[in-house]
Amino acid sequence: MRRWLALLMLPLVTFLVAAPARAETPDAELAKLADEARATCGRPAAERPNDRLVRILCGGHIRIGVRDYYPLFATHENDTRQGFEVDVADAIAAKLGVEADFTRVNAANRIPLLAEDRVDFVIATMGHNTQRDGQVRFIRPHYYQSETIVVGPRALKVSSWADVRERTVCATVGNGSNAELVSHDARLMLFDEAGVLPERLRSGTCTLAAQDDSFFAAYFADPAFSDAYNTKFGFAQVPWGMAVARTGSDRLAHALDLIDAIFHRNGVFLEYARKHKIATAFLEQQKIVWNRPDCNSGQGVSKPACILPALNSELQATSFARPVAVLEGWVGKNLGIDLQLPMLKTVPAWTLFKIGVATSLVLITGALAAALGFALLLGAALGSRSLLLHGAARALTVVLQSSPIVLTLVIVSALSHVLFPNTGAVAVGAAIVALGLVNGANAGQAIGEAMASLRAEGLTGALFGRALARSASQIVAFLVNAAKGTPTASFIGAPELLTALTDISSFSTGRVTTYWLLLIFYTVVVMVVVWLCGRLQGWLEHRQVAA
């Protein structure tokens, strides 16, 4: 009997041994991960693993970076946070059994705050692209998807990339789409928060604005906004991902991967999207994916068939990108300095940098020439015996001396746009005229006063030449001021070095190094200008002595 029973059981045993083990669900995998982390909570803090998941579960709090103003997704008013991402963040904290501590982030600081360990993870409308993969570890599956749209007045004829060339487009610092805008020769006006873009469109500060379609969805629901503005075109469809720091976050990242898979499978994301009236097509498709047996497992979050790839946003590298990277590494290793030279490593950044340097040199040369020219003209007029000429020159000088340089820039820029198309060259020309007028007026007053003092001394011949020599130090001082003031041209969209480096830093790392480079550039330029002006002053004073 036993032999017969053994023979009968043999096929069943063979089947059980040969059959593959049933895939573990993401729920079971998450529970196991959490239990392993909590098992260390009884140890002294110094003896626990250096692991964020352990710290979170043992401490009972998770620090979450969210936006403060991104309608429908995350807003913060009167100490109340609400929106799709806020609900998701609260649900994640509840799933881990901890309290959520929120920190305000924006496009510019959300990655640095992770690197500085000031938040544990961010859920902040961040598109997952290949550039950012080297900066943070993205959570997959992704929790949303969008594309960038260009929005402007309905009457404005813009429908393709060709129409944005040389136009100023308002965008946010850190937006992944900035690189593509710059590569199509758009000029960027950058803001820290997307929330200011609609108001800047209404005020006329921004003619065009680029931001996620999900951001503008709430505004297009307003009839007054949709009657005045429309979407010109869209680009860069990108999945959104939560993100954690690349170091010390492996188990936290895996736990969040599993939670996202569970939320897709159970329709949690879909429920919150419907609650906040945001588009659901992507989430409906993802719910189907994560209910498939191959994805609804502990290993599903790592299967290419289940997760979406990052948007490929790699920029074309320069021919000298590799030596630059080697130099950055050497400086970091041997000197302890985090040197970042993004302007030398990609073709769009290098192109912007070259244009910025060339434009700045043209701007400085032009500002010096304009300041000297206006100084001579106004000085001659102020020293004239003609009451009409003297009075007109005096009135113009007083107005220019009383107006802030930025206001003068804006006025001259506005007048130039009436006469000429809005291009980078026109902006540079307007800046040269404005800087020349402001500094030339001051230098011209010095020349006029010198002519008046010479007449008071009873001198009559060659007064203008002598006045130039007597006021040489003041003329030189205002010429140097003209050179130092050229970065203000960025305010009206001139593509000089400050504008170029700001654009570069909007789609790359290394902002600190970038602005140190700007400081070094202008320091060297001003030193050269001071030397040249010193030679000019010496020549003028020598003429006075000779006279």
Image (cartoon, helix red, strand yellow):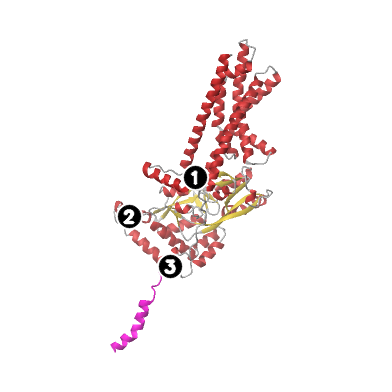
Asked if the residue under mark 3 is in contact with the one under mark 2, i.e. CB atoms within 8 Å, the reply is no
Residue 375: % across, % down: 62, 24
1 or 2: tag closer to the N-terminus: 2
State the residue in front, 4 or 517: 517
Q: Quadrant of residue 22?
A: bottom left
On the image, numbered disc 2 is attached to which residue? 49
State the residue in front, 204 or 156: 156
Q: Amino acid at mark 3?
A: Ser
Q: Amino acid at mark 2?
A: Pro
On the image, numbered disc 3 is attached to which residue? 297
> How far apart are the alpha carbons under marks 3 and 1?
45 Å
- Looking at the rendering, the stretch of residues picked out in magenta corresponds to 1-23
> How far apart are the alpha carbons under marks 1 and 2?
40 Å
Asked if the residue under mark 2 is in contact with the one under mark 1, i.e. CB atoms within 8 Å, the reply is no
2 or 3: tag closer to the N-terminus: 2
Q: Residue furthest bottom?
A: 1
Residue 341: % across, % down: 47, 44
Residue 43: % across, % down: 29, 55
Q: Amino acid at mark 1?
A: Leu
Q: Establish if 275 lies above or below 333.
A: below
Q: Is residue 482 magenta?
A: no
At x 57%, y 59%, the residue is: 279
Main structural element of the magenta stretch: helix, strand or loop?
helix
Residue 163: % across, % down: 65, 49
Which label is found at residue 344?
A: 1
